[in-house]
Image (cartoon, rainbow, N blue to C red):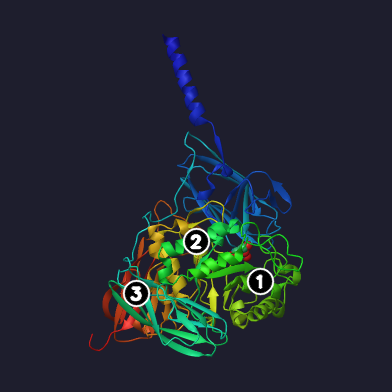
C-alpha cells in the first residue's frame, strides 16, 4: 500500500514538474499577427514587412516577426515569464529607416535599443522576466516619421513556466462597440454636397445634385449657364459651358414628402477644379494591387446602394494595379487582364453621375511595379482623356532613378510640371493629385502644378498612424484654399486590408469620429479606403453626416488651424463661409513616453477629459449657439466659453454661431 502511495505521489510530482516546472518557449512568430499593431500594412510572421527573409546589416535570420513602426503589442505573462531573447534592427529592404525598440515590463522600460538606423548591425536583447505581469513591445519612429521604418524582431522568443501560454492584452482603453451618433436622414428632400463647383470652358461638365430623402425624387435647376442641361430624374447636370463666368443656379429637389431648394454656384474658367476637396473612394486601402474592374464596379454600386452618393461622395478612383505589363507598339498604355475595357467601365461610372480616377507614377514603374508614365506623359494623358478619366493620382515611385539622391527643388517639380501640361492639353478636365509624400515641401508649390498633394507617408488603420498624419497638419494651414488642398492620405474606416487580411479598421469608434472630424476640419480630400460593398451601419452613418461633411465642403475653403495643444488635448478651429466656426475638441491623451503607449493594469489615462474652449481664444464675443455636429443637436447658447467631457481618443465637433440679438 505504502509503495503504491509512493508511486502515485511520484507520478503526480512528475506530471506537475512536466506541466508546470519546465520552461516552455513561445516564438513571437507563432503569435496572431493581426494583433501585432503595425504602422504600415500588417505585421508578418517569419518574414520582413515586405515579405523577405530578415536581413539586418547583411545578417540573415530565419525566424522572428517583421513589423513597421509605429508598432506595439502586449502579452500577459502573469509572472510566469522567465527570459526574452531577440536580435532587432531595421531591415535592409528599406533604406533610410530609423526606429527605437523598447521592451517594457509593468510600465518600466526593461530594455531599449536607442536610435537604430538602416545598416546598423542587429542588437541583442537578453532579459530576465521574473515577476512581470505584462510585457509590452514597442517600436517608435525615431522621431522622424514612419517612412522606411521596417523593424525586425529576429529570433524573438520568450521562455515561460506553467501551462498557460502568454496571451495578448488588448490595447483599447474602451471596448465600447461602434456606437452611432448621427440621426438617420429624413424622408423629406435635403440637398447635400458641394455648394460650389467649377470647370474649364469648352470642356465636359458633370455635377450630380446629391440629395437625401425618399425616392422617387425629381429635380429642377433655374438659371443654368448656356450649354448645360439637367436630367430631371437623375439630377445629373451635364454639357459644356463656352463662356467663363460665375453662375448662381437655383436647384430644387422634390419628392412626395416635400421640396428643398439651394443655390449652386458654377464657376467656369481657368484653374477652377476642386473648389471644394474631392470626395469619393480609392481602391488602395482595401484592394491594394488586386483591384479589378469587378471590384471597382461593385464599389460604385455600393456607393449608390448605401446612399453615400446622396451625400456628395463622387469619385471612384482606381489606384495602382490596373496597368498592363507592356505598352502597345505605338507606345499607348495598356490595361492588364483585370481591366478588360476601361472606356466601358468609365462610361458606366459616368452614367451614374459619378466620376472616375486613375493612378500612375512619373518613373518607369509605379510603386507596385507596374508601367509608369516616364517618357509617355502626354500619350498617357491622351489615353486617360479618351477613356473619360476625371482625376489622376500621380506618385513618385521609381522616379528616384531619374534624380540625385538629394534632388534640387526644380528636379522635384519637373515630373509634375510635365504631367500638368499634358493634362491641360486634353479635351477634358483631369484633376492632378500629387502623391510624393511631402517631398520638397510640396505644400509650398503644389498649387503651381495640381489641385492637391499628399503631405505625409501612407496611412494605416492605427491610432498612431492616423494621429501622426492628421495632427501634424498644423504647419501647412495657410496653403489650403479653394482649388488647392493638403492631403494627409485616405480614410481608414470600414473594412480595410491592402489586399492582405481584410479586417475592420483597428481604429475604435471614437478614433474614427476623430479621424473624420479632423479630416473635415483640415479641408482634406475625403477618399474612403474601405471595401464599400461591406460597409456596416456604423460606417455608413459615419460617412453620411451632412453637417460634418459640410465642414469639409465649406465654400470658404479654409483649413483649420491648431488653436492649442498640450500632452492630452488639442483644439482645432476652422472659419466657415457664414461667419461661424467649426471647432474640434480632441482628447488625444498622447505622450511621447514609451510607457504611455500602453494600457497597463492601473492606467493613468482617464477615459474622458473635460475640454474648455474660450471665446477670447476663438476671437469671438457675446452669445453663441453651440451645436454638436455629430449628434446634429444644439447644446445651447453660451457666452465666454464652452466646456464638455470628451472621450479618450475621441472628439466633440462643434459649430459655434453668433446668436441673433433676438435669441
Ligand atoms: C504609394 C502611395 C499609396 C499607393 C501606392 C500604390 O506610393 O502612397 O497611396 O498609391 O503607392 O503602389
Q: Pick the residue in front: 652 or 132.
A: 652
Kindly give the residue lying farthest to the top in the view shown.
1
How many residues crowd around disc 3 within 10 Å: few (fewer than 14), some, or many (20 or more)? many
Check if mark 3's residue and mark 1's residue have beta carbons within 8 Å: no
Q: Residue at x 27, y 80 (%)?
A: 638
Q: CA distance from mark 2 to mark 1?
A: 23 Å
Q: Quadrant of the N terminus?
A: top left
Q: Residue at x 47, y 50 (%)?
A: 106
Kindly give the residue lying farthest to the left in the view shown.
662
Q: Is residue 387 visible?
A: yes
Q: Is residue 515 left or right of residue 323?
A: left
Kindly give the residue lying farthest to the right in the view shown.
329
> What is the x, y in percent for residue 397?
68, 66
Disc on res. 383: 1
Q: Pick the residue in front: 233 or 17.
A: 233
Q: Quadrant of the C terminus?
A: bottom left
Q: How many marks?
A: 3
Disc on res. 190: 3
> What is the x, y in percent for residue 507?
45, 59
Q: Residue at x 68, y 48 (%)?
A: 53
Pointer 2: what residue? 299
Mark 2 or 1, nearer chain start: 2
Amino acid at each position: 500500500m505504502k509503495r503504491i502511495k509512493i508511486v502515485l505521489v511520484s507520478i503526480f510530482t512528475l506530471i506537475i514538474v512536466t506541466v508546470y516546472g519546465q520552461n516552455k518557449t513561445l516564438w513571437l512568430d507563432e503569435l496572431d499577427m493581426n494583433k501585432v499593431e503595425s504602422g504600415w500594412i500588417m505585421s508578418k510572421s517569419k518574414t520582413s514587412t515586405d515579405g523577405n527573409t530578415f536581413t539586418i546589416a547583411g545578417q540573415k535570420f530565419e525566424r522572428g516577426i517583421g513589423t513597421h513602426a509605429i508598432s506595439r503589442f502586449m502579452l500577459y505573462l502573469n509572472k510566469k515569464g522567465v527570459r526574452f531573447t531577440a536580435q532587432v534592427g531595421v531591415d535592409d529592404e528599406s533604406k533610410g529607416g530609423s526606429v527605437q525598440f523598447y521592451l517594457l515590463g509593468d510600465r518600466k522600460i526593461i530594455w531599449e535599443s536607442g536610435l537604430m538606423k538602416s545598416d546598423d548591425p542587429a542588437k541583442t536583447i537578453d532579459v530576465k522576466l521574473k515577476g512581470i505581469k505584462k510585457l509590452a513591445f514597442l517600436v517608435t519612429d525615431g522621431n522622424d516619421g514612419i517612412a522606411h521604418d521596417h523593424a525586425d524582431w529576429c529570433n524573438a522568443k520568450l521562455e515561460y513556466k506553467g501551462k498557460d501560454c502568454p496571451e495578448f492584452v488588448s490595447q483599447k482603453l474602451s471596448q465600447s462597440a461602434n456606437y452611432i451618433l448621427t440621426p438617420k436622414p429624413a424622408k423629406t428632400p435635403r440637398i447635400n454636397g458641394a455648394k460650389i463647383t467649377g470647370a474649364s470652358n469648352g470642356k465636359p461638365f458633370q455635377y450630380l445634385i446629391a440629395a437625401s430623402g425618399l425616392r422617387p425624387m425629381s429635380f429642377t435647376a433655374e438659371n443654368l449657364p448656356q450649354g448645360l442641361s439637367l436630367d430631371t430624374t437623375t439630377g445629373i447636370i451635364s454639357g459644356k459651358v463656352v463662356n467663363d463666368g460665375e453662375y448662381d443656379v437655383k436647384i430644387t429637389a422634390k419628392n412626395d414628402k416635400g421640396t428643398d431648394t439651394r443655390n449652386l454656384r458654377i464657376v467656369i474658367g481657368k484653374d477652377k477644379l476642386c473648389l471644394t476637396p474631392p470626395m469619393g473612394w480609392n481602391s488602395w486601402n482595401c484592394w491594394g494591387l488586386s483591384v479589378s474592374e469587378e471590384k471597382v464596379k461593385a464599389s460604385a454600386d455600393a456607393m449608390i446602394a448605401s446612399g453615400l452618393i446622396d451625400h456628395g461622395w463622387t469619385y471612384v478612383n482606381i489606384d495602382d494595379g490596373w496597368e498592363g505589363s507592356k505598352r502597345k507598339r505605338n507606345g499607348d498604355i495598356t490595361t492588364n487582364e483585370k481591366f478588360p475595357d476601361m472606356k466601358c467601365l468609365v462610361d458606366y461610372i459616368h452614367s451614374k453621375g459619378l466620376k472616375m480616377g486613375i493612378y500612375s507614377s512619373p518613373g518607369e514603374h509605379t510603386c507596385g511595379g507596374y508601367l509608369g508614365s516616364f517618357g509617355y506623359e502626354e500619350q498617357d494623358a491622351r489615353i486617360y482623356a479618351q477613356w473619360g478619366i476625371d482625376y489622376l493620382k500621380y506618385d513618385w515611385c521609381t522616379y528616384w532613378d531619374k534624380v540625385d539622391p538629394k534632388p534640387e527643388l526644380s528636379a522635384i517639380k519637373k515630373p509634375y510640371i510635365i504631367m500638368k501640361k499634358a493634362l491641360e492639353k486634353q479635351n477634358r478636365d483631369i484633376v492632378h493629385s500629387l502623391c510624393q509624400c511631402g517631398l520638397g515641401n510640396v505644400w509650398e508649390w503644389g498649387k503651381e502644378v495640381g489641385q492637391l498633394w499628399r503631405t505625409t507617408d501612407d496611412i494605416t488603420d492605427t491610432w498612431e498612424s492616423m494621429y501622426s498624419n492628421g495632427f501634424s497638419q498644423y504647419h501647412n494651414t495657410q496653403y489650403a484654399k479653394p482649388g488647392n488642398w493638403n492631403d494627409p492620405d485616405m480614410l481608414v474606416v470600414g473594412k480595410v486590408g491592402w489586399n492582405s487580411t481584410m479586417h475592420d479598421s483597428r481604429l475604435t469608434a471614437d478614433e474614427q469620429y476623430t479621424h473624420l472630424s479632423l479630416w473635415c476640419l483640415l479641408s482634406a480630400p475625403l477618399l474612403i479606403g474601405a471595401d464599400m460593398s461591406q460597409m456596416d451601419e456604423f460606417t455608413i452613418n459615419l460617412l453620411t453626416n451632412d453637417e460634418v461633411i459640410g465642414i469639409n465642403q465649406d465654400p470658404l475653403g479654409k483649413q483649420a488651424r491648431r488653436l492649442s495643444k498640450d500632452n492630452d488635448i488639442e483644439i482645432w478651429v476652422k472659419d466657415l463661409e457664414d461667419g461661424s466656426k467649426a471647432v474640434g475638441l480632441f482628447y488625444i491623451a498622447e505622450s511621447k513616453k514609451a510607457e504611455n503607449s500602453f494600457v497597463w493594469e492601473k492606467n493613468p489615462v482617464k477615459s474622458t477629459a473635460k475640454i474648455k474652449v474660450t471665446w477670447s481664444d476663438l476671437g469671438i464675443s457675446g452669445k453663441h449657439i453651440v451645436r454638436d455636429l455629430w449628434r446634429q443637436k444644439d447644446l445651447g447658447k453660451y457666452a465666454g466659453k464652452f466646456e464638455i467631457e470628451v472621450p479618450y481618443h475621441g472628439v466633440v465637433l462643434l459649430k459655434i454661431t453668433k446668436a441673433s440679438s433676438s435669441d
